């Protein structure tokens, strides 16, 4: 039961791109300034996040007789931007590092491309890391800044088989996964002939602003200032990307390590505990050093009343579980599992208000990255459901793991069906080469039912890697 599925990263092909262009809204839109929320503009979201969707040439689907996905999607983007016009603007920074959208109507960046490859050549199982990603989502020079740059970059690449790839890069301060999928879904609806998106966008970012006066009422260890005394932020050279598949049999194998009183734990909680533990073992921190896992929790339903339908800003928190490396690795899995469950349960409306207050009081800090692992579950986000007129995506979701303002820290849980027709979750992991070998060995040991404690009772004598 080996979860390692090697991707087709050895595949090499040529992508021919046209000159990048700006797509403006199809009609005049308001010229105004719209402030981001105090959750949106924190330092840890000031980066670009890549998403990629693969589509077959499905002759059962046609878009008004137009079979060129580039033309169909370009037109649909322009029409959708009439409703989502802030995406066509540019970010500015004001007093107190406050971010705002200058709704200039300049447009989003678009790249048209063709690749001399078929969808089939990518292999049976489309999952990160994708070959030649930098060609499928081209970093147009001068486009990647957080301020004064396009807020979206979209590349549509036609394939030899008639299929295509829709790749997108989002300035994360504008939206979270739910908000981005809402926008992509609207583009799909317009591409299929709608005149108005089924869900109209709602700005209302002030709902996630700090109180007056701001007051931190909850504990937020996710924003602790932790000195990197031993150089344990992941080195960026010699990084290895691998994806791991967890289907019904893998999840069942891991559930054998759960104590009876935690039997109702979710798959997210289980996988997070396992991956955090295996990752910590692989990186060999000092036994008494603090290690932490940040779980991204969607807070939309935590508000009373709930955030309005159509809200597309960032509405999540980073609750954290903290312990020492020795405790995490020497205790049974139930120890980590209880920490993860407790962290998730911390997120309430009061917690979100407290985070917003902390941002204003402390200058919008970055979440802690020293000896930190961040996990984000996008299994229900709906990237793969986005339909531009050619049916649902063969793969839809994050383009790679390890992305962020500090690379190498984050993993996504992505819905996936393997070549045997099993539905499960694929998790891209990014680690230094030495650590990836250990990570694979530890994870496979657990999947084979080996006692994960036998090898770690002498954990305290493991020497630090750096």
Image: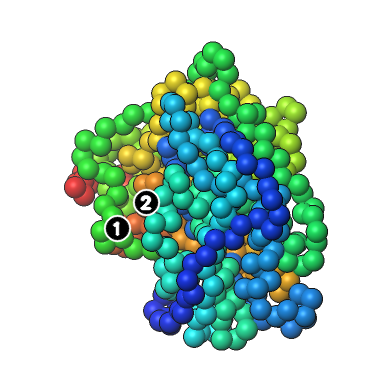
Q: Is residue 213 left or right of residue 304?
A: left
| Number of callouts | 2
Q: Is residue 357 left or right of residue 240?
A: right
Res 341 seen here: no
Q: Is residue 42 above or below residue 196?
A: above
**Colour theme:** rainbow
Q: Is residue 29 above or below residue 110?
A: above
113, 427: nearer the viewer: 113
Q: From mark 1 to mark 2, how far is it between C-alphas?
A: 12 Å
Q: Is residue 42 left or right of residue 349?
A: left
Residue at image location 57% in from the left, 15% down from the top = 212
Q: Is residue 193 above or below residue 121?
A: above
Toward the top, the furthest residue is 213
Q: Position of residue 88 (x, y in %)?
A: 59, 51
Give the residue at mark 2. 407
Give the residue at mark 1. 432
Residue at image location 79% in from the left, 55% down from the top = 196
Mark 1 and mark 2 lie on one chain; the one further toward the N terminus is 2
406, 182: nearer the viewer: 182
243, 14: nearer the viewer: 14
Q: Is residue 325 left or right of residue 43?
A: left
Residue at image location 75% in from the left, 61% down from the top = 189
Res 199 seen here: yes
């Amino acid at each position: 039961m080996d979860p390692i599925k090697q991707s087709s990263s050895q595949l090499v092909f040529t992508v021919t791109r046209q000159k990048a262009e700006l797509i403006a809204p199809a009609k005049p839109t308001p010229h105004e300034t719209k402030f981001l929320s105090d959750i949106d503009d924190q330092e840890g979201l000031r980066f670009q996040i890549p998403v990629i969707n693969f589509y077959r040439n499905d002759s059962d689907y046609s878009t008004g007789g137009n079979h060129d996905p580039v033309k169909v999607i370009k037109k649909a983007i322009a029409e959708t931007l009439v409703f989502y016009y802030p995406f066509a603007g540019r970010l500015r920074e004001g007093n107190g590092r406050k971010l705002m959208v200058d709704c200039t109507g300049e447009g989003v960046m678009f790249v048209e491309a063709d690749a001399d490859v078929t969808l089939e050549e990518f292999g049976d199982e489309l999952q990160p890391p994708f070959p030649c990603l930098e060609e499928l989502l081209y970093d147009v020079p001068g486009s990647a800044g957080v301020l004064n740059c396009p807020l979206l970059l979209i590349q549509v690449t036609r394939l030899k088989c008639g299929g295509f790839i829709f790749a997108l890069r989002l300035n994360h301060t504008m939206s979270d996964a739910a908000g981005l999928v809402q926008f992509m879904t609207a583009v799909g609806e317009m591409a299929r002939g709608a005149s108005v998106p089924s869900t109209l966008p709602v700005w209302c970012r002030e709902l996630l602003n700090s109180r007056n006066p701001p007051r931190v009422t909850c504990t937020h260890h996710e924003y602790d200032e932790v000195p990197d005394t031993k150089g344990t932020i992941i080195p960026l050279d010699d990084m290895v990307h691998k994806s791991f598949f967890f289907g019904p049999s893998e999840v069942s194998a891991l559930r054998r390590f759960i104590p009876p009183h935690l039997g109702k734990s979710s798959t997210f909680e289980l996988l997070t505990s396992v991956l955090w533990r295996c990752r910590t073992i692989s990186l060999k921190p000092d036994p008494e050093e603090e290690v932490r896992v940040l779980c991204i929790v969607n807070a939309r339903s935590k508000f009373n009343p709930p955030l309005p339908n159509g809200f597309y800003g960032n509405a999540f928190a980073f609750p954290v579980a903290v312990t020492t490396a020795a405790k995490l690795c020497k205790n049974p899995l139930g120890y980590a599992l209880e920490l993860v469950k407790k962290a998730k349960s911390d997120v309430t409306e009061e917690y979100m208000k407290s985070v917003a207050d902390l941002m204003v009081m402390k200058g919008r800090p970055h979440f802690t990255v020293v000896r930190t692992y961040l996990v984000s579950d996008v299994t229900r986000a709906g990237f793969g459901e986005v339909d531009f007129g050619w049916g649902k995506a063969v793969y839809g979701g994050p383009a790679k793991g390890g992305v962020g303002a500090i690379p190498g820290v984050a993993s996504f849980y992505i819905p996936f069906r393997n070549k045997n027709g099993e539905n499960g979750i694929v998790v891209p992991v990014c680690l230094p080469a030495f650590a990836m070998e250990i990570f694979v060995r530890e994870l496979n040991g657990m999947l084979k039912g080996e006692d994960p404690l036998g090898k770690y009772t002498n954990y305290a004598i493991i020497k630090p890697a750096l």
